[in-house]
Image (cartoon, rainbow, N blue to C red):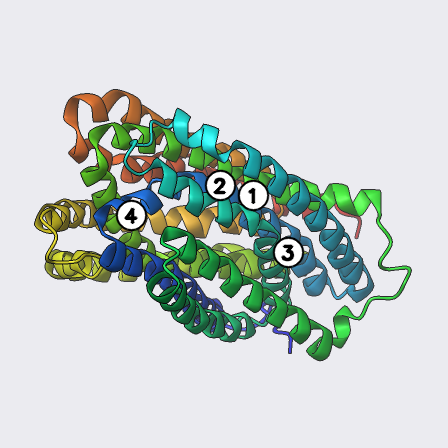
Amino acid sequence: MTRDLTAGNPMKLLLGFALPTLFGLLFQQMYNMVDTMIVGKLLGSQALAAVGATGSISFLVIGFCSGVCGGFAIPVAREMGAGDHEKLRRYVANAVWLSVLFAAVMTVATGLACRRILTAMHTPADIIEDSYRYIFIIFMGIPVTYLYNLLAGVIRSLGDSRTPVYFLALSSVLNIGLDILLILKGNMGVAGAAVATVVSQAVSGLACLVYVRLRFPILRLSRDELRLRGRLCLDLLGMGIPMGLQYSITAIGSIVLQSAVNRLGSLYVASVTTGSKVTGLLACPFDAMGGAMATYCGQNSGAGKLERLSQGVRDCSLLGLIYSVAAFLAMLLLAPFCARVFLDPTESDAASIVALASQFIKINTAFFFPLALVNIVRFSIQGMGYSAFAILAGVFEMLARSLVGKLLVPPFGYTAACYASPAAWLAADAFLIPACVWCIHRLYAHRRLQPA
């Protein structure tokens, strides 16, 4: 049930590994989009804005969870490439202990702080209560976020990128059913959408747990391997915290930008929410490419096959360029149609939201190739073992979004907000591309210093 990425054509391996991951991400985006579509069509544009106003906070916290789990999986991929299965199991055990600790602390802290954060972000008064109900429930689901992301990351590190997709497909169908049941039949409003999301992810996480126990003999842990080990925990934290912080630091810029958009009013919040959902779905291939490169570079650096690293980055970047051009051309024609999916056409402001969201979608997809490089190069660097660079890339993204939010949105309004993410992607690439070259040279230098 494992896959070796250290031999064979990199392009074929990356495609074969990334495609199942892509389907999983699409399913994940699907049930996020279903929340938005059902909220927008059944509860109206104000409820849609209420959910959208929590997006940057959710990215700050849930992104940290996902990043930490992705970092925890890198040593697993490295030991898989090196063939040290005993050490691999010890890494998995210590990752579980750390995830339990992180989940407990974060659930309590975010539950206590979320209303204050919404207030500090100038969330419009007409949507703040719905925003609070939605994000509080999402934060109470942090433990199941860790459960799914850690197990899915471990499974992918062993070369199996298909199985997590199947469980996400199951949870997506469940999420749709729960949305309809809780919002339409249960009259729970936006809280029903949040409950549906948490329950669905819990199901996919538990399914991963059962699968790991039944189908991966390599992960059957002995009592000694279950022990907490300080050195391994430090190694895991050295990978996981930088990857988590890259999302959180980036999200700080998103929060500053969201605060600026909030000041424009709920119409613009709903427009950014709609446009972001479309571009988020379209950007899934880049996340899949990044995940594939993390495992690919982790296994190949662990196996000492450094010559395959540059080739893998080049091949994956070519895939990113081809897709970026196709997505932009498609959105030149289809952006208004995609925006309408989230709205009730009978609402008085539906036409305005469609026009504004279409502008957002076209501008962002025009800069998709820089986004592709952010994911491909950053995750490649992390797979090579240099996770700290992720923090610096996140700082560049944060600064770019914050500057746009603080300096450009007030005088130039919504149009400036549309260019915030492209500015962040370009800023991150200016750092990441030379950093990737340096990391590869560093690995070669380290190998030359090793005794024969």
Q: Which mark is residue 41?
A: none
Q: Residue at x 53, y 32 (%)?
A: 113
Identify the residue under disc 4.
Answer: 47
Callout 1: SS: helix
Mark 4 or 2, closer to the camera: 4
Per the image, the residue denoted by label 3 is 73
Residue positioned most to the right: 224
Which amino acid type is marked by label 1?
Met
Q: Are marks 2 and 1 in contact (CB under 8 Å)?
A: yes
Residues under labels 4 and 2: Cα distance? 26 Å
Classify 10 Å Cα crowding around label 4: few (below 14), some (14-19), many (20 and above).
many
> Which of label 3 and label 4 is nearer to you?
4
- Residue type at mark 4 is Ala
- First in residue order: circle 4 vs circle 2: 4
Is residue 232 depicted above or below 10 in this figure? above
Give the residue number, with chain letter if any, for mark 2: 247
Figure check: 431 above or below 232: above
Residue 243: assigned label: 1
Instruction: Look at discs 2 and 3 and give the one toward the viewer.
Output: 2
How far apart are labels 2 and 1 at the CA level?
A: 7 Å
Return the disc, 1 or 3, that comes first in the chain's sequence: 3
**Crowdedness near tag 1: few (<14), some (14–19) or many (≥20) residues, C-alpha within 10 Å:** many
- Structural distance between the alpha carbons of marks 2 and 3: 16 Å
Q: Earlier in the sequence, mark 1 or mark 4?
A: 4
Q: Amino acid at mark 3?
A: Ala
